[in-house]
Image (spheres, coloured by chain):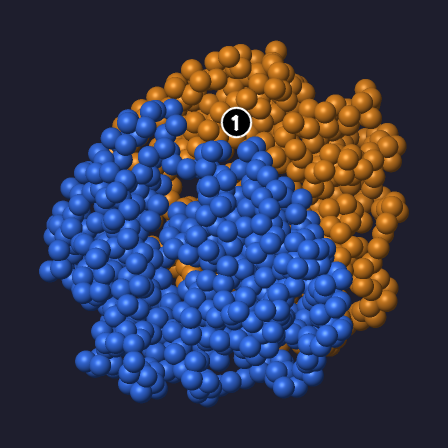
Chain colours: A orange, B blue
Amino acid sequence: MLRYNKILGFQKSSSRRPTLHGLLKLSQCGYSKLNSDDVTHFKSILSKPEISVVEDQDDIASYNSDWWNLMRGKSQMVLRPSSTEEVSQVLKYCNSRHLPVVPQGGNTGLVGGSVPLNDEIIISLNRMNQIIGFDSSFSIVKTQAGVVLQRLIDYLQPFGYMPPVDLGARGSCQIGGNLATNAGGIKLLKYNSLHANTIGLKVVLPDGTILDDMRALRKDNTGYHLKHLFIGSEGTLGIITETAILCPKISAASNVALFALNSFDHVQEVLTASKEFLSENLTAIEYFDKECNLIMKDNTKIFNPLGYAHNYYLLIEISNFDDTSDVETNTKAIEQKFFKFFEQVSDYVQDGVIAQDKFQFNSIWELRERIVEGFVSQGLAFTYDFSLPIDKFPAFVERMSDRLGNHARTGGYGHIGDGNIHVQASIKGHDDLELYQKLETKLEPWVFDLVEEFEGSISAEHGIGSFKSPELHRNKSDEMIKTMGQMKQIFDPNRILNPNKLFQ
Amino acid sequence: MLRYNKILGFQKSSSRRPTLHGLLKLSQCGYSKLNSDDVTHFKSILSKPEISVVEDQDDIASYNSDWWNLMRGKSQMVLRPSSTEEVSQVLKYCNSRHLPVVPQGGNTGLVGGSVPLNDEIIISLNRMNQIIGFDSSFSIVKTQAGVVLQRLIDYLQPFGYMPPVDLGARGSCQIGGNLATNAGGIKLLKYNSLHANTIGLKVVLPDGTILDDMRALRKDNTGYHLKHLFIGSEGTLGIITETAILCPKISAASNVALFALNSFDHVQEVLTASKEFLSENLTAIEYFDKECNLIMKDNTKIFNPLGYAHNYYLLIEISNFDDTSDVETNTKAIEQKFFKFFEQVSDYVQDGVIAQDKFQFNSIWELRERIVEGFVSQGLAFTYDFSLPIDKFPAFVERMSDRLGNHARTGGYGHIGDGNIHVQASIKGHDDLELYQKLETKLEPWVFDLVEEFEGSISAEHGIGSFKSPELHRNKSDEMIKTMGQMKQIFDPNRILNPNKLFQ
């Protein structure tokens, strides 16, 4: 959710069960304050200190703010190491001095995980932007963690491959940050998660230890598979500095269709049919409801070719991988497949379009990918990322809409193929903080109660960060959280890494 | 490797660096001896004690022996709990009494991981054989850990789905054991690993704590992804009692071809071309060399339709997933695809066949899957499972063959698409223990040195177990092994779980 209260210095209201589960409170950690000796030391261990040790407050400002531009950390220093060895030296020193740090990739996280809550030192990975190489025999790319996702996409393209993960923030987010947050995105349905596709990892622990698991063999069953502990740990256990990732082939041809439907039962029928009949060709199924469509109409210039009369919309992308045929044959095969599929689901679908060129392809995708902006450009917005049983999607949005009344507009959209819904609501305008806070009090923790009631997850793909840390217990038992606390204790006994993120 | 020395009571020769990395020696653990009070207690906490508490030595014998029938444990008791709750009570008690245990699934492991080294209590999962259900909306099956893989295959078949893992031992191995060893098998190339496909897990820790991570949502980014710690931990951290697994669709049609080639460069060309041109349709690429083929000729009744004159053989399986067409159309499409592919690689391939019916399909697969038996039926055998850079496959086998001289026949085969080779050697006959031991002394640790030289992995898919525990350092740095030791210390401080497996 977008927590406007952060800029007001308003503290998170108490949660139902703010358990610490073995973790110390921030105030009990005995953190030190950054001093001039520290600065001198950092300048002595980092190459090019003129660009790797950032003290200018103007330069630091963007590192202190999150994507929503609403969280404001008070960090006085950004360190920009250029190698694993430098990260190791920085962490070792910070650990010995009890200086808390926040690891930061592209800073595109949506749950307040990548910015300081206080004056933590920011360790930015943005100078660690070397792509090490691509091994075509196993389709594994090795790269430093600070490489921006779009650069990795561009690098792999001439090889005929692509990263297994893709998301709207591709122009800014870094692959290391994607790993640290276990980013989901639009390709998960087809290519599975980063747990599935991460073959190797290099991680620096708070005490400076380098865990090198980068041999990057396709199969290696020797001991505990530690790398998975760091994938999705949101920078609280170690800093990922290098990775080896399995990459899928770029398809020979692909296309996208948009369907309009009036009943959610029919949405589910089409969903089942698409998995059944398009199966291996299916690369994405995305969903949005009527209110999202209207929000786009009212607040953006993105036009829906199917109009605004229908209740539900499904975007379906399919791809063809037949490299024994030419592009034209593949493109035709894709279209034929869509036509056959239309016949299969004609009882359920009110209307549909297939893109005829790259422009239309992108336009249909924009209808879905830019909904978040539609809500945000209308006014102050709440944004949630949940997993829910698919049949609960409309009921959830309706309950939230009822709760907010006519004070806000509420819609649901997301990666329906994975059961991942984004629920967004925004009030009219950007100034009515009083209304926004009043509504927030109505929404939380009520909305998390509702997720629990529907047996969903309070975070499908965005993570926990600082926004949802009081709510972790909704999805994880005391035993699970206790075990997570033990992991934290092993790797980061001084709690210098990303304090008060993930755990409260 | 097949360690014949086990039956002679011969102890593993000292390894180069038998580090303990924070773990205690067996003798230092202060284990208790099973007594009659313990037996009484187990009978009181397990349902149906007449079948769940096994004390008869004849009944225990098979639990004490491994698949090779060469390891002989001295366990005096097998416990067969029927629920997670019962496993919890058993472990809690054993932990409090310092009674060591060995968790056992189908007991098909090949590295001595599932049988006792001494008189550990065996906890068999074979009564925990309930399949909980299949959720078709996300294609996730929930099951108890003791379900035999073939039963899961049969259960899923009417839904049109299958488990993501398959291996020769499917008739005996259990899904929980597959997870505990991170089994690879013949489908990994297409469907990825068990890390990729395990959505939920229930695990019992040594102190009886139940970690329940079975909500089984397709996406759930809430906290550390602990389940991966247990996948591939070989029963040393906890006992997996339930799981939720993502299942792929059964293909609409599939077929298999066998190719004969004379140069390994050509094998690599065909491999690259198969990934390039068959891509999404490719479900398996398997490999064997001339000596494996001759071993099959001399020791089994399985006939190679391409004869015995060629140096290398590739088995390629492709599948079609077009459910908008009928089986006949799909079958024809598959055949057409193979013919097109033959044209693409005709410069490299000496000869090839495509199966014309189910019988031929199975026969071609038998040529590859039963090589292990070919070697074993010839005589005392060494069997290794490695990952290697693909171009090193023939050189590795040649070096090993040179090392053994004309005392043994040596061949290489395996999942070449994943870089996973099985190297096997057997002497003539089953009685010459002296020669076998002499050769073993020549082979080890030399063979592990060679894997290191070639930058491979000492275990691609079989795990470490007890056979390879002294060699873990070949693939994992001191820092990695130390961290693994810390995990062991957190979960199993009394070292009751599968002692001296994975770690020495």
Tell me where residue A20 sits by quadrant: bottom right
Q: Where residue A100 sits: x, y (%)?
A: 74, 66
Horizontally, is A81 left or right of B210 in the view?
left
- Tell me the chain of label 1: A
The foreground one among B285 and B239 is B239
A242 versus B136 height, above or below: below
Horizontally, is A111 left or right of B433 in the view?
right
Q: Where residue A338 sits: x, y (%)?
A: 40, 22
A72 versus A25 height, above or below: above
**Quadrant assignment for the C terminus of chain A:** bottom right
The foreground one among A340 and B441 is B441
Residue at position x 71%, y 55% in the image? B47
For the residue labelled by badge 1, is the local secondary structure a helix, a strand or a loop? helix
Residue at position x 68%, y 28% in the image? A392
Horizontally, is A353 left or right of A55 in the view?
left
Q: Where residue A282 sits: x, y (%)?
A: 45, 32
Q: Can residue B203 be seen in this view?
A: no
Horizontally, is B468 left or right of A457 in the view?
left
Tell me where residue B482 sits by quadrant: bottom right
The foreground one among A267 and B43 is B43
Residue at position x 13%, y 50% in the image? B351
Q: Can residue B214 be seen in this view?
A: yes
Identify the amino acid type marked 1.
Thr
**Quadrant assignment for the N terminus of chain A:** top right
